[in-house]
Image: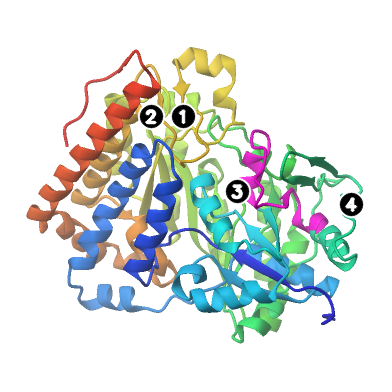
Amino acid sequence: MIKANLPKVLIVTGGLLSAGEKSMWNALKKQYKQVKAAKAHWLETKIKLVTAEMLVYEKLKKKRGKLAEYFKGESQSIPELTEVVLADLLYREGIPFEAITYDLLYSNPKKANQLLQDTQVVLASSTLLHDLSELMPLIKMLKRDHNRIILGGALCGSLYSHWKGDSLVDIMAIGYGEFLVPKIADWIKSGFKEIRPPEQGRMIQKEHTLFLFSGVPESRDLDFLPTPDWRVAESYHQRKFEHVYYESVRGCPYRCSFCNYPFLFDDKKFRTKSAEKIAADWKFYYEELGVKYITCLDSLFTMPKKRLVELCKLLIAQKTNVKWICYARADDLADESVVKLMKAAGVSQVQIGLESGNQMMLDQMNKRCTVEQNLQAIKNCRKHGVISMVSLIVGYPGETEKTLKDTLNFMREARPDFHFLATFSVRIEDVPMFKAPHKERFGLEKMDNPYSFAPYWRHNTMSCSEVGEHVRILGMQLCEEKISLEGALFYQNILHYEPVMKEEFLEYQQSLIKGNTYLKKVFNWINHKVDLKLQKDMKKVFPDNKEQLQQIKA
């Protein structure tokens, strides 16, 4: 029961930009503030430019038939899982609250300002923010003389070890929100006089900011966590949600060299909910709330394999008729019986981190997976009507033109439905590849820069001044050769996609490149100018100017 006499909390979630931006002017304002706060941002600019190119082509191209219906289809806007969890936890504690996204600060500043005036605490999520250049301009817009800012979310998990905080941020909350929110609620109820960490947690007072750590559960079993009640979100959004987000694991049992997910939540252990718990939650969502789609946000939903098989059998037995999306490992999907069972249990799409089509690169990433398993996984998905979306990393230490060619050849054979291309990043500090043996082996050097999501780097076989053009060329090849669909173009309405649409969409995607000859020349010129700026910056960061490969011309 909400207690009206208590200070009100404002929950703020979301990212800086999204594919569904409704106002170009607001998007430009956001980007302008972020660039002003950024440092050494030319690699970041290159990455954004490469992504924007196909989006611009798409906006200018007329669409017909199924394609027009697809892009006109209304994708229901649903709140982040972070918002739903925080709202549910505050509701259980009796704390009054409101909820907005960062976008409201730009799209409706009058309403945002009124909400900020009426609330005494801001719970600001960093989960969809990349770095301090995105975070701090938003925090400045949230701060008022009378309010207190509590910052939480995934970015905090990577910032806390090397950031001293800021005078605008009262508390940085790191770890399990389920442990932290009750303690924050007690602090609010005390009139902000006393705050204590969870029983297993700790506090560190730095120069400006109190760092509040949740600690970790004693057990690897997460069944004790409360099931997020989407009815709370439905009550203040005043509408039903047929599509919801779900989380069933924390951490990851694997240690891919580039990934920090196993170390988020100030935790290093892989913890899971049971198949029985997930099945019960989904049955409740389906039967009581009318949910039709569930997106699993877990880093790895298909592990443990035994749990996955048990869950699928339970969903089939209890006739929970929902479609679901999950992240999966290719070696799990290489087992055709698993894919067949998942399809029978309602899976519609899997997102797979393939990363490379070269075995040496997979080994250096410590993927513990083979090119053959990756290929078989895609084939199994296609055979059983499961949509496949794959991610590839370009520029990881050891990357060369040969390894990129191997990746292209792999994609030609595998032909997944969708692809995302990621530029190798050194943004996250606490990952295995930055340990001494890895850095020395590959000659990896990087710039420490928390004010960009793409700090500069170089290694023995490639530098960041080249990688953006490699990403651009590979992306163009995948589109021109009608291999797979660019995820950034089509993802917003992905729930409406069916495999039978692929050929028409590939034709359309190919036409975007072939039909924009003049505009492509403009992008070539802009890319060249950005490349020159990046090369100039690289000379400042790495004064000896040791470039490993000849620059690629746009």
Q: Which mark is residue 320?
A: none
Q: CA distance from mark 1 to mark 3?
A: 18 Å
The residue sitting at 66% across, 82% down in the picture is 236
Q: CA distance from mark 1 to mark 4?
A: 45 Å
Of 363 and 96, the residue lying toward us: 96
Circle 3 residue: 299
Report the side of 133 relative to 275 (left or right): left
Circle 4 residue: 196
Circle 1 residue: 362
Q: Earlier in the sequence, mark 2 or mark 4?
A: 4
x and y, in percent, of residue 403 in the image = 33, 27
Q: Earlier in the sequence, mark 1 or mark 4?
A: 4
Of 517 and 119, the residue lying toward us: 119
Badge 3 local density, few (<14 within 10 Å), some, or many (20+)? Answer: many
The residue sitting at 43% across, 51% down in the picture is 34
Tell me the SS state at disc 4. Answer: loop
What's the residue type where badge 1 is placed? Leu
What's the residue type where badge 4 is placed? Arg
Tell us which disc is closer to us: 1 or 4: 4
Q: Which residues are magenta?
A: 153-180
Residue 316, by quadrant, is bottom right
Tell whether label 2 touches label 3 (CB within 8 Å): no
Circle 2 residue: 358
Most extreme residue toward the bottom is: 238
Residue 462 in view: no
What's the residue type where badge 3 is placed? Ser
